[in-house]
Amino acid sequence: MRRIVALVLAVVLTCGGCAALRGSTVGYGDPADFPRDQPVTILLPFTAGGSSDLLVRALAPFLAEELGVEVIVENRVGAGGQVAITQLSIAPADGYTIGLTNLPSTLAYLNPDKVASYDRSSFTPLAGVNRFRGMLTVAGDGGWRTMADLVRSAKERPGELTVGVDGLTGDDHIAALELEHAIGADLKIVPFDSGSEKLIALVGGEVDLSLGTVPTFEAQLSTGELRALAALDDEPIPGYEDVPTAIDAGYDLVWDSYNVLSAPAGLDPVVADRLESAIEAASAAALADPAFVDQMEAGGYVFGFRPADEVAGLWADLEDKWDDLIPLARAQS
Amino acid sequence: MDTFAQLLDGLGAVLQPGNLLFALAGCLMGMVVGILPGFGPPAAMALLLPVTYVVGPVPGIIMIAAILYGGMYGGTITAVLMNVPGEPSSVATTLDGYPMARQGRGGVALVIAAAGSFVGATIGIIGMVLAAPLATAALSLGARDYFAVAVAGLALVVGLAGRSLVKGLACAVIGLVIGLVGLDPVLGTPRFTGGVPELFDGFDMIAVVMGLFGLSEMLVGLEKRVTGGRVAELGRIAPTREDWRRSAGPSLRGSVIGFFVGLLPGSPGTAATFSSYVLEQRLSKRHRKEFGSGAVEGVAGPESANNSLGIATMVPMFTLGIPSSVTMAIMMGAFVVHGLTPGPLLFRDHPDIAWAIIASLLVGNVILLVLNIPLIRVWLLILRIPFPVLFPIVVGLMVLGCYVVTGTAANILVLVGAGVLGYCLRKLDIPLAPIALTMVLGPILESNLSRALLLSDGDVTTLVGSPFSATLLALAVVAVLAPAVLRTVRRARPAAPETTERQKEPR
């Protein structure tokens, strides 16, 4: 008897747990009333403590203030973001579930190997909140002092210089392909399982060069263990003014990444507008808070609101570029 | 010495009542979350991270570090009392800790584990202060070296296999197969995932070990129609002089192993705890037969290794600004939130903060030890909870724990599947421990092998091309072949006394 009770209790608890995972079912109210005493959930494709997590969690209280309802940040980790983004794409389009669709990493759906169940039309972009600038770096004790030095070596020894990437056919790999195109020389792509493994290999001299956002390299650049050869932006990066841009060095290469908030497709335009303006107001309020600004500076963020139409345009442009590069990346791996 | 002067300054800062209070609060919160079956240290840190945002940088970071080792000890409690490891590296503790608890020696196991953790952490901190430059040296290790680490780790299977080597190897293969699921390291395409994105990163290791060890244990209890608590008498808590004597050596050796493995970014903690376990098993002359059924050495060694490793993984973060594990990535987040960047700059710009945090590790571990000894009596009551009450609570918490950290409901299915697999393997009398080792090492071995060959343009000799990899691979070969060779020798000279043979035996 007791055994049966135990089994029943276990089943009930398990099912209860599973049911809770489905989240509360949401009723459609009048869009003009949005939001009404219901929390807004932000689905986050990354682990606690990561750069996107810290940003969204820092911004969430300001957004809650603007919307007048609670804002919940939920980490759903897996498959380089695909797990969370899949869930976002099938969530009810009522404004109560939004999520982070970072660009360009979200574009992994363009790779048929990833069997993604969504594409650009599955989402309503709401706003961009942050941009990370890109950099090209080499080990500090290596022989290359300028990007031209590096390109000369790459051309002398085609296919021999190694570039570390944190995953095949991901945004890092695509960036490496763009570098190959820009300098007109082949490189050897060496994949790593994570960004920190890639960094260790770069500092330890196992790979020759690497591309990435400024905060990834900051600590090592400050000690001279790494050397930045080029800023992959339109203008020199604040704090690294002595590092020329790739464009100034004569190579057409710009690379950056964006934190973007999106809702599922089919969101009522009234609700979308409400969310967009709330994010804009929350961003302004956050920038007025010294503690928030300190955190953004320490983390190497370029925090700032970008309107929905700008983000949508960016998304479409990046998609065009990736459509050409994905087949090349797949052929290389 | 300059470093020690700075450490003393740091100690002075930590010993302020405010900071002490946060260290205490962190230890307590970490332990309380960590003791829930299913919530290991990463879960405890991820859940409690926001709590540390509200206090200033030094207390906040002291607190998150305290949550880490509080959570680690909480995980030890669940491993010993419920056979639920909070992460793969705690599996080694369950091998003898849980049998000890079943024999009414759970209190002894927990005291030895607490003392062993303390020794491990202390040696880790001393190593951190003295041997920080080694972290820079460890950076020069490459793919072939990590390949060798993984191969040497796999050689430990021979020591874990128990009575039947064939069964041990079968189990090792199951672990390797589990490790195959995920993205192919050469092609970057999903493999054996059935198109389920949740499996692209492979099975969640925490869900698998909890299912294999914890859930299957619960299923066995269900089958046996256990109605009472799991032990009739709680037994004595204080270890005997003999227990202490037997634990001292394993604890010291375990601490050293843990420290050096922890220094290598990207090498798994599981390798350290299992190395310590197998080493003690081999070194023990009189008690070797007790391993697997309640040898105190099997608790002391891995626990010390695990804690020393926990401290050592912080070294790459402090000295180089590189997080070498999930927990360290969370810790780095705690720094960034407070406007600090861990790494060499921290020591240059804010040496007071850096050293206060390091000193807090020392103080925090004392707090943890002092806090724990009286609480052990309370934790032991878990063993008296009637099974029909304990079962649903533990299973419910495991389900919740699997879900909470990653937010992936598919992990619950992984937990249940692993539980059923563990139950079947128990029925077949196949040892489970090798699975925990090989499923962690398999992917590391594969991706580093392919990377090493990519870097060398397919030249296989690269694998023995560095002194580090050549030495480790040679050790692995010796470890695998030695028992067979010794057996042949022993058969050839039947008159040879037993003990001298064992002394010759390399690990």
Image (spheres, rainbow, N blue to C red):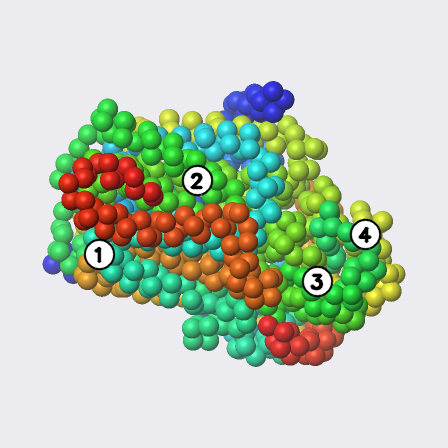
Q: What element does badge 3 sit on? A: loop
Question: Which structural element holds mark 1?
Answer: loop
The residue type indicated by label 3 comes to Leu
| Rendered location of residue A15, percent (x, y) | 32, 64
**Which residue was labeled with disc 1?**
B164
Report whether B238 appears left or right of B355.
left
On what subunit does the disc labeled 4 rest?
A
The crowd level at tag 1 (other Cα within 10 Å; few <14, some 14-19, many 20+) is few
Quadrant for the N terminus of chain B in the image = top right
Secondary structure of residue under mark 4: loop
In three-dimensional space, the C-alpha distance between marks 3 and 1, rounded to whole angstroms, equals 49 Å
Mark 4 and mark 2: Cα distance apart in space: 39 Å
The residue to which callout 3 is attached is: A161
Name the mark on residue A145: 4
Q: Mark 3 Cα within 10 Å, few/some/many (few <14, many 20+)?
A: many
Count neighbours of disc 2 (C-alpha within 10 A) and say few if under 14, some if 14 to 19, many if 20 or more: many
